[in-house]
Amino acid sequence: MFIDTHCHMNMMGKKEFDVLLKEEHFPKIKEVVEVALQNGIEKIINVGTSLPESINCVEIAKRFDNVFAIVGIHPCDATKDWMQDFKEIKKLVQRKEELKIVGIGEIGMDFYHKPFDKDRQRDAFKAQIELALENDLPISFHVRDAADEFLRALEEYVKEIKGGVIHCFCQKQDFADVVLGWGLYVGIDGPITYPKNDWFREIVADIPLNRILLETDAPFLPPQQFRGKQNHPAYIPIFAQTVADLHNVSLEKLAEVTTNNAENLFSI
Ligand SMILES: [Zn+2]
């Protein structure tokens, strides 16, 4: 079995961002969960990016036994009113057991999408790391074009946090060395199959299997053969095969190790 440790099924049921799911959206989400199960993806962690999307993740987790929620504010969603939303996120986290909240995320720093406010992103990032710390929850990290600032912000907390994963890991060797040294996991997605990513496959070949999680980020980042289409948690075995080949292990062995990693990190 596999676990999709980072998915956005909330974005697969509806077209608009940052609006609450309606009853009419759930049949599509139910179908996603069922097709995933048929393909051996037995657990799915759905990750929030904003307050409404975090509420959606909680709502989806409530309806499906094998789906869990991660809540938080994405750096690109750290608007000037982020503190208001953060208060509400905190209220959700207070009910973490009941709401099946297994982590905080996706949080971090992103200087790719413009415009951005570095200070505000850093403030929102740190506040949410502290929330994870207070609640003994692991973290799903987002970092894009902000490696140095991200590492600097995280450094002061990293020894105390319960653990975390660099979601959609696609970074250089020096970054990999730092985060692996800190005991973090890296999340591998469809881009491991993209032809231009030879440099990245070389890095992943050297990352110990006990530090790797599999995730789709669906509906985004489909593996090469589905590029241009919507990604799906059921596609995990496709790019997992690439990871297995890089490490000279069977797909079954990779599934076993990465599932174990995910169950340990998120206590699921
Ligand atoms: Zn994501």
Image (spheres, helix red, strand yellow):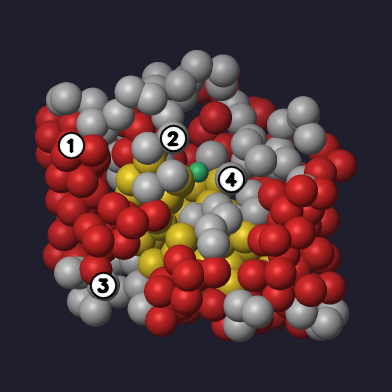
As measured in the structure, the alpha-carbon distance from the residue carrying label 1 to the one carrying label 2 is: 15 Å
User: In this rendering, is residue 235 above or below 188?
Assistant: above
Q: Position of residue 180 (x, y in %)?
A: 46, 77
> Which numbered disc flags the more N-terminal residue, 1 or 3?
1
Q: Amino acid at mark 3?
A: Val
Q: Secondary structure at mark 4?
A: loop
- The residue that disc 1 covers is 120
Callout 3 environment at 10 Å: few (<14), some (14 to 19), or many (20+)?
some
Check disc 2 and report the residue beneath it: 112
Name the quadrant containing residue 9. Answer: top right
Label drawn at residue 217: 4
Mark 1 and mark 4: Cα distance apart in space: 25 Å
| Gap in angstroms between the C-alphas marked 1 and 3 | 20 Å
Residue 61 in sight here: no
Residue annotated with mark 3 = 158
Provide residue 206's location: percent of width, then percent of height: 65, 79
Q: Which comes before the other along the chain, label 2 or label 4? A: 2
Mark found first going from the N terminus, 1 or 2: 2
Query: Would residue 202 appear left or right of 150 to someone viewing this image?
Result: right
Task: Look at the numbered disc 1 and give the secondary structure of its residue.
Answer: helix
